């Protein structure tokens, strides 16, 4: 499928998504407490608390800039990039309304040439790699620009995503909000990471019901939906 989809097609797809969806759609209301994004949010919030004042932070595939703005409010030097101009414009607008100092730029996750090597202490790439035709090229770029720690989340190959693809078409591009090229088996994803000099700091299997359930049952395979990994570079 990836070989048949051009970069212009993808850019237009996510431009339309940016115009269609409201900001912070996965981080407020019902989604903040339940379902797959709430589970992911709980893990990332806990991990991002370790980023201290004055550190540099980059989110690749930031969409509307939720985590960038969250860290900017904590006086972290925060930057977000996304392929969609429409999403970046909304992110800038939200940051301005919140009187926050942070940067947002249009950039392709597979090609970060304008960013210097080791230019960010912390890099976050959450639920992005599955949307890219060449995820290995993007992973290489992520490692290149990371100085201290890389935080990754990807959909874990599981019954949950099998059902979601069957009934909701997350692996198709004919509806806004889909666009998965793949989900990841744990062993396969770890092989991709271990091509680079790094140390796996923490692995967490988040679910699709509630963060509270994950605390006790996150190791049950049938409850797993998102693979969350902290990598020390």
Image: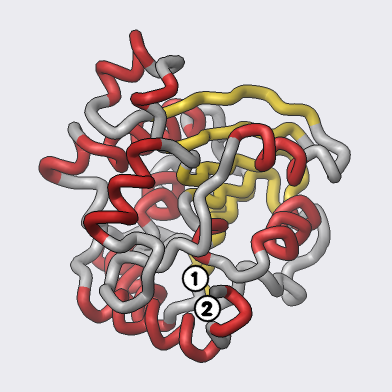
Q: Is residue 111 left or right of residue 226?
A: right
Residue drawn at x 64%, y 44% as measured from the top left? 122
Residue drawn at x 53%, y 68% as measured from the top left? 81
Q: Percent from the top left, x then y, of residue 113?
A: 76, 75
* Image mark for residue 73: none
Q: In which quarter of the image is the C terminus?
A: top right
Q: Can residue 94 be seen in this view?
A: yes
Tag 1 residue: 82
Q: Is residue 183 above or below residue 60?
A: above
Q: Percent from the top left, x then y, of residue 167?
A: 23, 55
Tag 2 residue: 106
Residue drawn at x 58%, y 25% as measured from the top left? 203
Q: Are marks 1 and 2 in contact (CB under 8 Å)?
A: yes
Sequence-wise, the earlier of marks 1 and 2 is 1
Q: In this view, does 5 lie to the left or right of 188?
A: left
Q: In which quarter of the image is the N terminus?
A: bottom right
């Amino acid at each position: 499928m990836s070989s048949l989809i051009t970069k212009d097609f993808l850019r237009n797809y996510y431009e339309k998504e940016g115009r269609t969806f409201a900001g912070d759609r996965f981080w407020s209301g019902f989604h903040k407490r339940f379902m797959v994004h709430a589970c992911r949010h709980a893990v990332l919030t806990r991990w991002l608390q370790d980023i201290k004042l004055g550190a540099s932070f980059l989110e690749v595939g930031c969409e509307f800039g939720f985590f960038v703005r969250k860290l900017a409010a904590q006086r972290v030097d925060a930057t977000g990039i996304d392929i969609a101009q429409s999403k970046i414009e909304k992110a800038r607008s939200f940051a301005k309304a919140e009187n926050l100092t942070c940067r947002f730029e249009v950039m392709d996750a597979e090609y970060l040439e304008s960013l210097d090597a080791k230019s960010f202490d912390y890099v976050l790439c959450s639920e992005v790699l599955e949307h890219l035709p060449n995820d290995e090229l993007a992973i290489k770029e992520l490692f290149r620009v990371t100085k201290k720690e890389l935080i990754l989340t990807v959909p874990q190959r599981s019954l949950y995503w099998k059902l979601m693809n069957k009934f909701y078409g997350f692996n198709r591009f004919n509806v806004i909000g889909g666009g998965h090229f793949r989900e990841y088996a744990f062993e396969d994803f770890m092989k991709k990471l271990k091509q680079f000099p790094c140390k796996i700091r923490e692995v967490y299997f988040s679910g699709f019901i509630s963060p509270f359930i994950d605390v006790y049952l996150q190791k049950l395979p049938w409850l797993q939906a998102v693979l969350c990994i902290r990598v020390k570079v």
